[in-house]
Amino acid sequence: MRLFKTPIAALLTTAVAGSFALTSFADHHGGGHASLEALAAGAHRSAENIARNDARHPVETLEFFGLEADMTVIEILPSTGWYTEIIAPYVRDQGKLYAAHFSPNASLSYMAPNLRNFEAKMSSDPSLYGKVTIRHLNPPHEVVIAPAESADMALTFRNVHNWIMADQQNEFFATFFAALKPGGILGVVEHRAKPDAGMEVMKTSGYVTEAYVIELAEAAGFEFVASSEINANPKDPTVHPRGVWTLPPNFRMGDEDREKYAAIGESDRMTLKFRKPL
């Protein structure tokens, strides 16, 4: 078990604040738990994370996927936990959240530190994140991200391009299929390439065609349910010097043409919903 060197007083203060925030949300909205709207703009989130709501549309996206407070949910590779801040407290009391994060044994140097930072975040506020179960996802070695056929929903946000780069896309989709119960939902948000983009573009730019994501999901056994333009950005031409990372929030070009890329905003994104057959 990893021990985090966080002062007890600070943990207690954070826990009380988080508990008060959730109680305030529930009281204000007249329900037994915080609404997605309240959590997306909650005091437990940084100003920087809240500011990205306008580009990421978390409430509309989660509603499109059909998230309910009593569901067992898997968030796939949550990175710093931007979406976890909303999903974890939403399902805390009635449902369950598995965070399928990087493995400490992962080969790429950034993965283990990213996992440690996420673990520290989850332990820092038990009132919000104390019921989150962290699992490691590292195909083909670590692929049990929840008990078999136990989850109602699996969600992945802007990850498919990384799996394509690693040539592991089929392994990842097979993992989600195994963890979802029959009738379970897979929700995918991904940077969207132009329809005629080839595999070389998808392996280098961070953009993926909508048709290829559907092909991957169907090859794993999923049925395509619906798509949404919630996260579309028609201003994004999708061809940039440093791929999708040219755009905010990364700005890989530094100050070069920064105003131009800031005006485009975050990437054009597909939002796709799939179902595991009954």
Image (cartoon, rainbow, N blue to C red):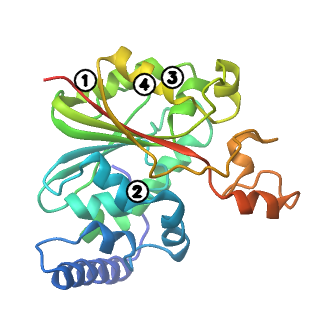
Query: Nearer the viewer's eye, disc 1 or disc 3?
Result: 3
User: SS of the residue at dot 4?
Assistant: helix
**Disc 1: which residue:** 178
**Residue positioned 52% across, 76% down in the render:** 47
Separation of marks 3 and 4 at Cα, in angstroms: 5 Å
Q: Position of residue 177 (x, y in %)?
A: 28, 25
Residue under numbered circle 4: 214
260 horizontally vs 90: left or right: right
The three-letter amino acid code for the residue at tag 1 is Ala
Q: Amino acid at mark 4?
A: Ile
Q: Which residue is mark 2?
A: 83
Q: Quadrant of the C terminus?
A: top left
The answer to whether the residues at label 3 and label 4 have Cβ atoms under 8 Å apart is: yes
Q: Residues within 10 Å of mark 1 (few under 14, many from 20)?
A: many
SS type, badge 1: helix
Q: Is there a contact, CB below 8 Å, between mark 2 and mark 4?
A: no
Q: Position of residue 149 (x, y in %)?
A: 16, 28
Towards the viewer: 12 or 193: 193
Q: Closer to the N terminus: mark 3 or mark 2?
A: 2
